Image: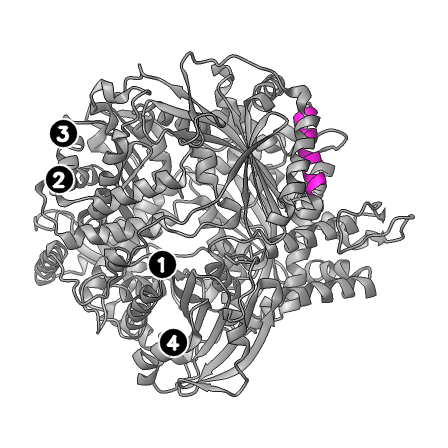
Amino acid sequence: MFRQTKALLQKVRYLRLNGQQNTWKLKSTSARDRAAQYQPGQKIHSFTVREVVAVPDLFLTAVKLTHDKTGAQYLHAARDDSNNLFSVQFRTTPMDSTGVPHILEHTVLCGSEKYPCRDPFFKMLNRSLSTFMNAFTASDYTMYPFSTQNGKDFQNLLSVYLDAVFFPCLREQDFWQEGWRLENENPTDPSSPLVFKGVVFNEMKGAFSDNERVYAQHLQNKLYPDHTYSVVSGGEPLAIPDLTWEQLKQFHATHYHPSNARFFTYGDLPLEQHLKQIEEEALSKFERINPNTEVPPQPHWSSPREDHVTCSPDALAPDPARQNTLCVSYLLGDITDTFEGFTLSLLSSLMISGPNSPFYKALIEPKIGTDFSSVVGYDGSTKEASFSIGLQGMAEEDTERVKQIITKTIDDIIHGSLDFRRSEVQIDPQNSSTEYNKPFIVGDGFEEERIEALLHKLEIQMKHQSTNFGLSLASYIASSWNHDGDPVELLQISDSVTKFRQALKENPRFLQDKVKHYFKENTHRLTLSMSPDEAYMEKQAKAEEEKLQKKIQALSDVDRKEIYEKGLELLAVQSKTQDASCLPALKVSDIEPTTPVTPVTMGAAGGVPVQFCEQPTNGLVYFRAMCSLNTLPEDLKLYVPLFCSVITKMGCGALDYRQQAQQKELRTGGMSVSTQVIPDSTQLDMYEQGVLLSSSCLERNLPHMFQLWSDIFNSPHFDDEERLRVLVMSSAQELANGISYSGHMYAMMTRAARHLTPAGDLQETFGGMEQVKFMKRIAEMSDLSPVIRTLPRIKKYLLNPDNMRCALNATPQKMSDTSAQLENFIKEVSGTRKERKPVRATVIERPLDHLDGSGPTRKLISELNFQPFQMKTFFQLPFPVNFVQRVCSYGTVLPRGLRQPNNHSLPLHRLSVSLCILARMMTAKFLHGEIREKGGAYGGGARMGGGLFSFYSYRDPNSVQTLSAFRKGVDWAKSGQFTQQDIDEAKLSVFSAVDSPVAPADKGMGRFLGGVTDEMKQNHREKLFAVSHKNLVDVAERYLGVGQRTCGVAILGPENETIKKDPSWIIKKSDQ
């Protein structure tokens, strides 16, 4: 998996520092306490302890070690979290764009000395209970992380990972499959034309179909032109075919060595066991070397530079006439200076984040472009950081204007000054609920209130607990540690905050001085523009064809014969059933037999149903409210996602949108509204529709959070057309940009699923191609007054306590106060309460707790007369690869009596568990081989959910052939040619998802949103355990066979002659 430079940014500096942790009962033998007993200089299994540091803010103890023999670096973060993580990363510094580190990342996972079977990585996905397994190639390192809650599983996965990275087979056939190869288009037909194939080759063709990705890559290459950052570490599609197998093996020999490795473990498992296994299975077999992989500093330019690149036009862009991008990027300092990086990250947020920031005011609000450029803000993922600022969706004639605005804004920041004199009330940094006046501002400097808001945001992120803390931590420290920065220093965030406050106190112009040094006086800056070229895709295809022909022309007849024979050999290997018995595996008996209980209580506040869930939330309160859409007129449905995106950003009560944004940052961990379409778990004809209000805050800020919601309910602002236009343009741009990255999801939500179930139809309306095109139309409107008139109408129906239920997750100590604050909120918004009739005639009430019919209910829409029908839709888009989806509805073949809402025999539950296991098994045992290994797609498989059985492929060079593979997958399942071991592995894979950890903030949400109780989960669990070979063959024959189900098909991809000639397809172009 190629990790884009920018993808790390949000994790690196504004990390959600989180993880499951019990604050109710302090264990005397906690993982933190055990780790604190280590002493510097202590020897443990050929490692020496270098440093032991308690990090109370993050509830962990950090232990830093080095391996005596090889010099390998090791960091252990001991924390009372059962979701343990391991990662090993290597500094990988390629000097060409052949993608050697990326192809190597794929190839080492294809078999090793101890585990020589083909593709042990993907096989272990089905032999473990891992909560995460993957590998990443960044610009200058490659990381291999996994996490699991099972101690035995951890040892199994560690053994596989260690053997993979240090002792891989690196077979030539694996290089051909994962990297690139010349092969006959039809491997069994020597007369068919030779073409390029390979998983990474197609992955990167897909990656470079994303204009944002193209721009980010060019920007990095041109800002750092003198070493490894000047090349594409993931591989430039036209350069990938220059890589040889020998070069791949040599790169492994020089880079994948313990002396070039950094090991990281996290969680509550004992450190000693990790060290012992790593030493015995890997490090003891190596001697120290000098890997010579350091990245030298980029020589600084004596004068700024400008450059220009082109990209493919985007027919879905909000304004087709404005598709230019311009950005100015500045080279900053070394990221191993922890405090300087911390300061520049905060400075970046002050400059660009939210409507109160100077660059937002200067660039976004004048509507010169649709949004900031795809690369924006501080980026600490390279040895020397960078800061970028610019616009996308702008007109070419505005280029000089944007440059001038950027220069002027920097000058304004520098020359503005802050006078921090106070009136009577003083700021208490430890209590942000204290009322205080804004500082007196001279010029355009940074208000102290904005700085406090950012530090408050950081405090919340440190307290917020989610389930992937170990992985977030590994990503957070990766870049700096990769260049020999101190990872422990990075974890001591409170020290940086204290130092930052002191620097501001000593020098009120501390931040302006940084702006002057790094931006005003910095001659190492690049201005990069990008414009669409109508012939871009044609030129790319022509360049690939020329590359191909050059390769072919150099071939002799003997070479061609050898290529054909090697293609047949590879096909034979791919088609052969592999013996995976060498791999370690958990057994189904290792799975916990029961579902953990999540205690919740039901109550009411002002007549509104409330679910209370007491959890160790670490001083935070989480609030949700589900507001029904049942009374909303049908003609307003398309506008609901827009309403959700703007309702918390337009201003409310006495606050304009800037003040509202400031108060949200000062008082909350965020406020959002999102659409919800929840299919019923027992009847495909039924679903719940609504919008979900979500927010969180520190306990001390509860009154402020609910006051903000009260103002939104009682007096939201909708009449600022200029503000609305800014939000509409940004939203439309974001939707258009997302298609090339998540095309398979759009394919599923488009015609593939919309005509199969009532819920699928609404999901397409809210989040599919229909919504993308609707937002494009809104963005093109010269007059938004019709939209401004529509939004209050929606608000009237949605923000209505009569159609609402709420949920609170908080600590036991704070739940009473939280409940009282919620009661006050409901009273304050009682004026918006009004009973309205549902638009649809048939509304079925289902209790949130099926054991308590007298309690709160969910009001589901029932559409018994909905008739699914088949449709095949091809969306022609400017992509070089396809996203293919085939979705089947299995509920339509049930006898009509079983589909009645008063029938509680749960027929779909029995079907869904078998289909769920079948989807996972079909993916692992058949579709992966057909679609990825043979077909060369980046990904593909089957999934089950929402009453639909879906087949999909991702970044796929094929289309019609992939649909054929889907059909063959059904035939394979019907044939029953799978073993009990195959079934058990599928169950392990399914249970790894079912039992994935749930954060305190999210406990009880399954019951609140979907009415799924612990009893129902246990019932589902027992049915999963009971699935048999006969069940799987039966559901494949009855519900997936031809004529036994209604299916929808959708493909997003390039022009396709085969589909054009087939009248059964509906073809839609991107501008339709």
In the image, what residue occupies the spot 31% across and 14% down?
865
The residue mark sitting in front, 1 or 2, is 2
Q: Position of residue 454 (x, y in %)?
A: 68, 52
Q: Quadrant of residue 360?
A: top right
Which label number is shown at residue 134? 1
> 699 or 138: nearer the eye?
699
Q: Secondary structure at mark 1?
A: loop
Residue 677 appears left or right of 918: right
In the image, what residue occupies the spot 8% across and 62% down?
558
Residue type at mark 2 is Val
Which segment is the magenta one?
702-714
Residue 748 appears left or right of 1037: right
Extreme right residue here? 424
Q: Position of residue 35 (x, y in %)?
A: 51, 75
Q: Secondary structure at mark 2?
A: helix
Q: Secondary structure at mark 4?
A: helix
Q: Which residue is mark 4?
A: 273
Picture layout, residue 297 above or below residue 789: below
Mark 4 → mark 2, Cα distance in angstroms:
43 Å
Which label number is shown at residue 436? none
- For the N terminus, the image quarter is bottom left
Residue 708 inside the magenta-drawn segment? yes
Residue type at mark 3 is Val
> 430 or 1011: nearer the eye?
1011
Which label number is shown at residue 1033? 2
> 184 or 857: nearer the eye?
857
Picture layout, residue 853 above or below residue 450: above
Label 2 crowd (10 A; few <14 / some 14-19 / many >=20): many
Label 4 crowd (10 A; few <14 / some 14-19 / many >=20): few
Label 1 crowd (10 A; few <14 / some 14-19 / many >=20): some
